[in-house]
Image (cartoon, rainbow, N blue to C red):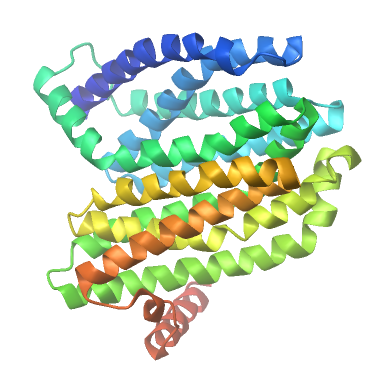
Amino acid sequence: ARLGCVTRLALTAARCAVLVPGGFAILPFVMPGHEPDIVAAAWWYMGLYLPAYFLSLFAANMFQGQLDLLSWNVVRAIVPTAYLAGSVALGLAAAPEAPEFAAANIVAMLASAALGAVLMARRGWFGLRAAGTEARALVVYGAKAHAGEVLHSLRQKLDQAVVATMMTASDLGIYAVALTVANGPLILVQTIANIAFPKISAQETQEGKVVVFGRYLRLALVLVAAIDVVLWATNAWIIPLLFGPSFAPAVHVANICLAGLLPFAAKLLCAAALKACDRALAIPRAELWGLVAVAPSLLVLVPWLGRAGAAESLVIAQTVTAVLLARRLGRELDMHPLRMMIPNAEDAGLLRAAIARGLGRG
């Protein structure tokens, strides 16, 4: 763990050394015409975002790699939790705009990285020597396994870039609040997908993989649907309460984004199953088609519908990616993905057993 920690930290520094100057080079071409405070915020945000993001991701992944799932979930939960708390504090204390929310995002990621560093130091994982052989292996594996994540991240940021370019800073702030609220349940879905991956991979037969995949898929979809219903019913009250009446327009945008959580959950579970079947390269192909879908839809829907159009483009992209991954997984495991979404008697039995265990502990 100590050697892996130092090697990953060295790779994190190397990536920042390459990507941050590249971002600075691009900024002058994407920020003309914006207000001076937004331009100034873009420069410091570019310089801080990548290091903060990579450090928080590095800290969480160290615990995931050591199968310390409790610490892994605690460290990565700090980012959305601290960001939401910071956004609420800003809304209560002042009239926040985009730069303040950007600062809250950076602080949240640094808080996650700091907690991870403390926990790693207590375990004695820090050292002074990196391993070249391990670094090369990590780079090769990362190129194969995370190509889809790169395309996904690009697609997830493209909508905000279009809103920032075509609309006002206040529109971007409202859109950011809507995304914050709508993306809150994602950590639950990602946790389920990360737990499902080793469970599916451990199955020796195709039939076993199908059974385990179906269980986790249905669990994720049921939980997301329940959360969607609750948020749809309460967003009109929660968002103005937490962020102020001026952010009431974010309610409609957040409700649209919530519609994309179901295909997003299906996409994550299908991606986990494809990785478990050693078919990870199918994921970036599907993400590429999602990017192809979101780009023209943004250019059409944002001028027409504004913030709501950006949210609808996200739902379209999530749906396209989920459908493509489900079709690829269906061919791989010789099953019909839609049938995997239908609850069955076994699910009811597992639910009764879980409830009985919970009552027994109580």
Q: Quadrant of residue 316?
A: bottom right
* Lateral position of residue 207 relative to residue 191, left or right: left
Q: Is residue 129 visible?
A: yes
Identify the residue at image location x=46%, y=21%.
Answer: 50
Residue at horizontal 35 percent and vertical 53 percent from the top: 194
**Residue 145 position within the rendered picture, expressed as x and y whole percent measured from the top left:** 25, 42
Outermost residue, right side: 245
Q: Position of residue 129 (x, y in %)?
A: 18, 12
Residue extending farthest bottom: 345
Above or below, 212 against 186 in this view is: below
Q: Position of residue 25 (x, y in %)?
A: 48, 9
Classify residue 231 by image quadrant.
bottom right
- Please tell me whether residue 172 is drawn above or below residue 72 in the rendered image: above
How many badges with numbers are in the image?
Answer: 0
Q: Nearer the viewer, residue 88 or 115?
A: 88
Q: Residue at x 28, y 63 (%)?
A: 328
Q: Nearer the viewer, residue 129 or 150?
A: 150
| Quarter the N terminus occupies | top left
Residue 312 shown left or right of residue 347 in the figure: right
Residue 227 location in percent, x, y? Answer: 63, 63
Q: Is residue 9 above or below residue 195?
A: above
Left or right: 125, with 115 as reference point = left
Whether residue 192 is visible to the viewer of this picture, yes or no, is no
